Image: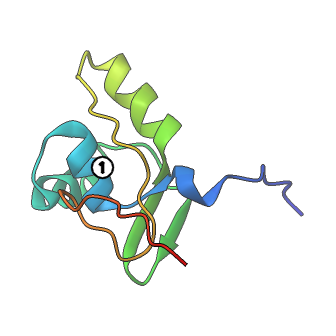
């Protein structure tokens, strides 16, 4: 059995997050992944491939690409949507 390192779920990214990090369109990221131009994903889910932020940072750095690294978002949050503190 292969030992797997535990990963903080907030550090996992799919194609949409990778696109945001690299300033590319999601279709471009999907194309790069299908042609083997991105690192090997840590998982393949029905929704698509999953990488860690560190994998993408390292991959981009090795190619001299700038990375926008927005803070991980919680469920239901979308780009451009501000986090709102809710009172109890």
Name the residue furthest right. Answer: 1
* Image x and y of residue 31, in percent: 17, 57
* Nearer to the camera, 78 or 85: 85
| Residue sitting farthest toward the bottom | 46
Residue 78 % position (x, y) = 25, 66
Q: The C terminus lies in which quarter of the figure?
A: bottom right
In the depicted view, which residue is nearer to us: 69 or 86? 86
Instruction: State the residue at coordinates (79%, 54%).
Output: 4
Corner quadrant of residue 26: bottom left
Residue at image location 23% in from the left, 23% down from the top: 66
Q: Which colour scheme is used?
A: rainbow
Would residue 24 be found to the left or right of residue 49 on screen?
left
Residue occupying image coordinates x 43% and y 64%: 85
Is the residue marked by circle 1 packed among few (<14), some (14-19), or many (20+) residues within 10 Å?
many
Residue at 46%, 61% (x, y): give it: 50
Q: Where is mark 1, residue-wise?
A: 18
| Numbered marks: total | 1
Which residue is outermost to the front? 88
Q: Is residue 49 above or below residue 40?
A: below
Q: What element carries label 1?
A: helix
Residue 60 location, x and y as percent?
32, 27
Counting from the top left corner in percent of width and height, residue 15 is at: 29, 60
- Quadrant location of the N terminus? bottom right
Q: Is residue 27 above or below residue 8?
A: below
87 vs 9, nearest the viewer: 87
Quadrant of residue 59 within the rendered picture: top left
Report the side of 19 relative to 8 (left or right): left
């Amino acid at each position: 059995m292969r030992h797997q390192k535990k990963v903080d779920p907030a550090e996992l990214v799919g194609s949409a997050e990778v696109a945001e990090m690299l300033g590319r369109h999601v279709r471009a990221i999907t194309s790069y992944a299908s042609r083997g131009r991105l690192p090997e994903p840590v998982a393949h889910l029905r929704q698509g491939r999953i990488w860690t932020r560190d994998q993408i940072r390292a991959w981009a750095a090795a190619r001299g690409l700038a990375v926008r690294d927005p803070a991980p978002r919680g469920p239901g949050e979308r780009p451009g949507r501000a986090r709102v503190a809710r009172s109890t």
